[in-house]
Image (cartoon, rainbow, N blue to C red):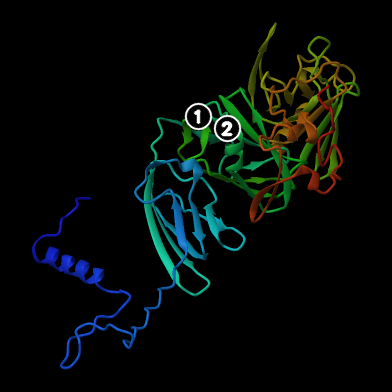
Amino acid sequence: MRRIGLTGAAAVAVLGMALAGCTSGGPLATLPASHGASASATGAGAAAAPSAKPTPAGPVVTITPGNGTRGADPSKGIAVTASGGTLKNVSVRTAGDPVTGSYSAGSTSWHSRWALNVSQSYTVTVTAAASNGSTVTKTAAFRTLTPASTFTTKILEGYGQSYGVGMPIILYFSQRITNRAAVEHALQISTSKPVIGSWYWDYPCNMAATCAYFRPRDYWPAGTTVSFTGHLNGVEGAPGVYGHHTLTQTFGIGQSVIAVASTKAHRTKIYVDGKLRYDWPISSGKPGDDTPDGSYLTIEKANPVEMKGPGYDLMVPWSVRFTFSGDYYHDAYWSVGQQGFENVSHGCVNLAPADAETYYNLAVPGDPITIGGSPRGGTWGNGWTMWFLSWPQYLKGSALHQAVEAGPGGSTFVNPATLPPDTAKAPLQTAAANNSV
């Protein structure tokens, strides 16, 4: 904005105001000269003029970043204080994401809740009051920095899609995140039913430079609606590397469909909504190709899937995948005679055609599949293996070392020691401990 100087009559007027201001408020009033009186009041008998009453001092308001600041660090947000008074109102105008914040006890300070957007202008207007009733209004306008380097974040879940009760929220980060506590603090979850869970950081992960997973302590309640917001715009994920967008998503948790297989008993049980619905014969991996133990989640399904290996290349119907390396529940019409008696597969769980079709029609991504009784343990990261870890183990993966309590009003971080005891039972409400060994 150009500065326009005062010239001509305007300048004279300002000068006159300045001079008038310099002659007011002295200790003695100047009396006009009159007939029979001195032009100045002196001597013992002179009456002193009454003193002017001081103007009540209002509170001192400080806004950070200050007015005119350019290149403010968005990760630090906005801080407001009132010295000698209390804050009555703090408002923030911006074309970016709306800014919310909270007052301290006694309303002597205020701080924005989330990071500010990068490359964005803000105007903060503050009203504060002193105990004597005097008020002050102050405004500060500033602009945040434009970072030289940014990171992006993607969420695996699709909008409005339905997932199984074991499904974690999976986030993929384009850059290595070193300031994981700051990023984790910016992640908010709202759930239609109360949920306790935790974030877990994985780096490097299969799909990105850094991953973060939110998993409930126990399986999600069936029918839960989950809304996620990553307030990542302006968060410094690594030195000089800032998020530049806010990520949101809403998805649902469907009915509970849980598969539990025993490679020793050659059977799998399928529980639907907490009740045993099916008990089928299976054939799992033959010696040397043993199906690995662990509590997995269904990843995807297709009908058919081409499967290749030493001596075979087949289009396999009704196939539901649960490891990245290629283990499935699937139709194996060629092994029906061995199912229930012998393990003859290359690592998959073989089912009779009608059973495979029934399970295929039930399955969505995130349905738990637990394999037990195998001489081979599961491998972390070979599939969505978040349920390999017990709850105490999973908590250790949080950068904040805190649990998350989520509900319709959003989420808060809490000390795990303050949580109510866990009463969930495996395998229908949660995964068994040490299930991958």
Name the residue: 37% across, 49% down.
142
Separation of disc 2 and disc 1 at Cα?
8 Å
Amino acid type, residue under disc 1 in the picture: Pro
Q: Is residue 82 above or below residue 170?
A: below
Residue 42 in the image: state x and y as whole percent: 27, 82
Quadrant location of residue 49?
Answer: bottom left
In the displayed structure image, the side of residue 417 where residue 408 appears, left or right: left
Q: Nearer the viewer, residue 113 or 207?
A: 113
Name the residue: 73% across, 36% down.
367
Q: Is residue 419 above or below residue 313?
A: below
Q: Can the viewer see residue 273?
A: no
Task: Determine contact: label 2, label 1, CB under 8 Å.
Answer: yes
Q: Nearer the viewer, residue 62 or 150?
A: 62
Residue lying furthest top in this view?
A: 311
Label 2 environment density (alpha carbons within 10 Å; few <14, some 14–19, many ≥20): some
Q: Quadrant of the C terminus?
A: top right
Residue 231 in the image: state x and y as whole percent: 53, 44
Q: Is residue 82 above or below residue 69?
A: below
Q: Nearer the viewer, residue 415 or 221?
A: 415
Q: Earlier in the sequence, mark 2 or mark 1?
A: 2
Amino acid type, residue under disc 2 in the picture: Asn
In the displayed structure image, the side of residue 382 where residue 154 appears, left or right: left
- Find numbered disc 1 in the image and state the secondary structure of the residue it sits on: loop
Q: Is residue 21 above or below residue 407?
A: below
Residue annotated with mark 1: 239
- Find numbered disc 2 in the image and state the secondary structure of the residue it sits on: loop
Q: How many marks?
A: 2
Quadrant location of residue 294?
Answer: top right
Residue annotated with mark 2: 179
